[in-house]
């Protein structure tokens, strides 16, 4: 593993509410994620982590722990209230402070996002190959022939028959929609891929195919990934390292096998034992 992380995040904060003197200075000063004085909800309380090239970082925690909010902040779907983000080989001391134009560049060239709900990541009124072309156009490509070839290459990679490349994703099964979404996220060879609960709601056989695809992408392309899941089986299969979130905080982190086989924090112990 290389020493230089592809993504480094320090003290990421995200709140829903005005905040007050009681919570703004120290959001970790209370155990729950809601300020007992002003009622502000702190979805992310000074979250810090690193992801290295070719590594899959797993993120687990119960509903409301801040996992998905953290992912939306990383992809600029939501503004942060504090923190520093640095992407290697991109000259910025803090991606969260960039202007909207530079954030669009990062979204379109340096990151790919796969949402739990494919409707958030796909345009259902575009064909499958049209969805990939949209991502390529957003990054500045205008060559129709090149975009067509890239689209075919990606759809083949995620096992979508080329005979269906001009079909609309609304005609596809949930698993196929997720695979189209993954192909779109990979369009510009981003060094970072964000995956938020991508197997939720899928049949077990379909889940297995999507997970196998993710491992293949990691092996063949060497992309760094952050994978959010409430399913510890998914995390065990995919993640090299894992962070555990509770009430907007990271309460435990380490190698995935270490976290799942010998959890130290009482909450992680409960999480693991609930599945035994």
Image (cartoon, helix red, strand yellow):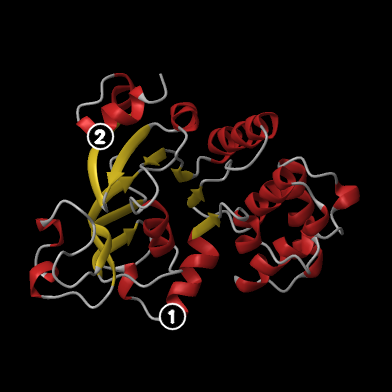
Where residue 206 appears, x then y in whole percent?
69, 34
Residue drawn at (60%, 70%) of the image: 139
Q: Is residue 237 left or right of residue 212?
A: left
Q: Are marks 2 and 1 in contact (CB under 8 Å)?
A: no
- Could you say where residue 6 lies in the image, as x and y percent from the top left? 37, 50
Q: Nearer the viewer, residue 75 or 13?
A: 13
Residue 148 in which image quadrant: bottom right
Residue 112 position, x and y percent, is 53, 57
Please give left or right for residue 73 compared with residue 262 in the image: right
Dot 1: element: helix
The answer to whether residue 244 is visible is yes
Quarter of the image containing the N terminus?
Answer: top left
Residue 140 visible in image: no
Which label number is shown at residue 29?
A: none
Q: How crowded is the residue under tag 2: few (<14 C-alpha within 10 Å), some, or many (20+)?
A: some
Residue assigned mark 2: 267
Residue shown at 42% from the left, 24% from the top:
275
Q: Residues within 10 Å of mark 1 (few under 14, many from 20)?
A: few
Residue ID for mark 1: 100
Q: Considering only vertical position in the picture, is 110 above or below 38?
A: above
Task: Please determine whether, in this image, residue 256 is positioned above or below residue 52.
Answer: above
- Helix, strand or loop under label 2: helix
Is 195 on the left or on the right of 158, as rendered? left
Q: Residue at x 50, y 32 (%)?
A: 234
Q: Is residue 213 above or below residue 261?
A: below
Q: Residue at x 39, y 40 (%)?
A: 57
Q: CA distance from mark 2 to mark 1?
A: 38 Å
Compared with 224, 124 (above or below) is below
> Residue 118 is drawn in which quadrant?
bottom right
């Amino acid at each position: 593993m290389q020493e230089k992380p592809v993504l480094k995040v320090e003290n990421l904060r995200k709140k829903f509410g005005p905040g007050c003197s009681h919570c703004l200075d120290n959001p970790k000063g209370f155990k729950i994620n809601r300020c007992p004085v002003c009622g502000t909800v702190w979805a992310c309380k000074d979250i810090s982590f690193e992801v290295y090239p070719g590594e899959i970082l797993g993120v687990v925690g119960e509903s409301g722990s801040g996992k998905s909010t953290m992912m939306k902040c990383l992809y600029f779907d939501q503004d942060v209230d504090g923190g520093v983000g640095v992407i290697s080989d991109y000259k910025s001391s803090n991606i969260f402070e960039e202007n909207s134009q530079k954030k669009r560049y990062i979204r379109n060239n340096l990151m790919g996002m796969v949402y739990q709900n494919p409707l958030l990541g796909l345009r259902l009124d575009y064909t499958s190959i049209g969805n990939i072309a949209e991502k390529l156009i957003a990054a500045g490509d205008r060559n129709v022939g090149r975009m067509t070839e890239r689209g075919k290459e990606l759809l083949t990679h995620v096992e979508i028959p080329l005979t269906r490349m001009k079909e609309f994703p609304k005609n596809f099964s949930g698993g196929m929609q997720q695979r189209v979404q993954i192909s779109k996220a990979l369009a510009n060879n981003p060094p970072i891929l964000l995956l938020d609960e991508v197997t939720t709601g899928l049949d077990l056989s379909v889940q297995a195919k999507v997970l196998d695809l993710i491992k293949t992408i990691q092996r063949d392309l060497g992309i760094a990934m952050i994978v959010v899941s409430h399913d510890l089986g998914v995390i065990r299969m995919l993640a090299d390292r894992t962070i555990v979130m509770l009430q907007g905080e990271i309460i435990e982190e380490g190698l995935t096998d270490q976290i799942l086989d010998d959890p130290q924090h009482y909450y992680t112990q409960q999480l693991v034992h609930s599945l035994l």
